[in-house]
Image (tube, rainbow, N blue to C red):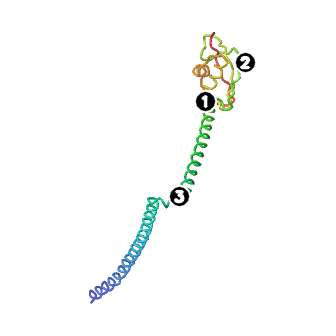
Amino acid sequence: MKTISVWLLILVLSAVAVPAQDAATQQQIDQLRGQVQDLQDAQALQAKRLTALEKEINDLRDKSSGGSGVNSDALQRLADQVQEIDKKRQEDRTLILKEIEKLGKISGGSASGRKPPVVTTTTTENPVSIGTGPQKGYDYTIQRGDTLLAIAKAYREQGIRVTTDQILKANPGLDAKNLIVGKKIFIPAPAQ
């Protein structure tokens, strides 16, 4: 008797589980049907828009081929707009070239375009030339925007022939890519 009641209990429980599973499956199917219907409606709307655009394109073709749809005033307005855009493009180009020129001046020399002043002629021992005696040169304080190339160029313009390599050799530990504003460096004067 116990086995029959156990089997009846199992049968009742399985009968209850099947409808619950069927209800979840049915809900998923209904969701998918709704999504498919939404996609079909969107596709129909796109088809209507496409048909309207095709009709508009055909109307424009007919107007342009017949010559009556395009008037000279519309063409003149279009030509004026194109010329205005071209004029603005030229102005922008000129402005960009000026800015590039400014940047070139800043990166190629000191920020203010000034020449580094020659301080005083000093007789200093150059650490690189230990054993060869004192070397003549100039003290220079690094300014904002300075580069070794700009400093050497400014001294050359003043008649002092010096290269960036000579400045680096005369200042051990000097990093050409990271000049410290306010730091004094030694500019060697070439032997005459």
Label 2: how many Cα within 10 Å (few below 14, some 14–19, many 20+): few
Q: Mark 3 points at which residue?
A: 71
Number of numbered callouts drawn: 3
Q: Which mark is residue 120?
A: 2
- Identify the secondary structure beneath mark 2: loop
Question: Which quarter shows the C terminus?
Answer: top right
The residue positioned 53% from the left and 58% from the top of the image is 71
Is 24 positioned to the left or the right of 175 in the image? Answer: left
Confirm or deny contact between disc 3 and disc 2 (CB under 8 A): no
Is 142 positioned to the left or the right of 28 in the image? Answer: right
Q: Residue 56 carries which label?
A: none
111 w.r.t. 156: above or below = below
Three-letter code for the amino acid on which mark 3 is drawn: Asn
Residue 175 x %, y %: 59, 28
Mark 2 or mark 1, earlier in chain = 1
Residue 94 x %, y %: 60, 39
Is 186 positioned to the left or the right of 15 in the image? Answer: right
Residue 145 x %, y %: 65, 32
Residue in the foreground of this view, choosing between 92 and 164: 92
CA gap, disc 2 and disc 1: 25 Å
Three-letter code for the amino acid on which mark 2 is drawn: Thr
Residue in the foreground of this view, choosing between 46 and 105: 46
Judged by depth in the image, the label closer to the viewer, 3 or 1, is 3
Three-letter code for the amino acid on which mark 1 is drawn: Gly
Mark 3 or mark 1, earlier in chain = 3
Label 3: how many Cα within 10 Å (few below 14, some 14–19, many 20+): few
- Identify the secondary structure beneath mark 3: loop
Q: Name the residue under label 1.
A: 108
Residue in the foreground of this view, choosing between 97 and 158: 97
137 w.r.t. 5: above or below = above
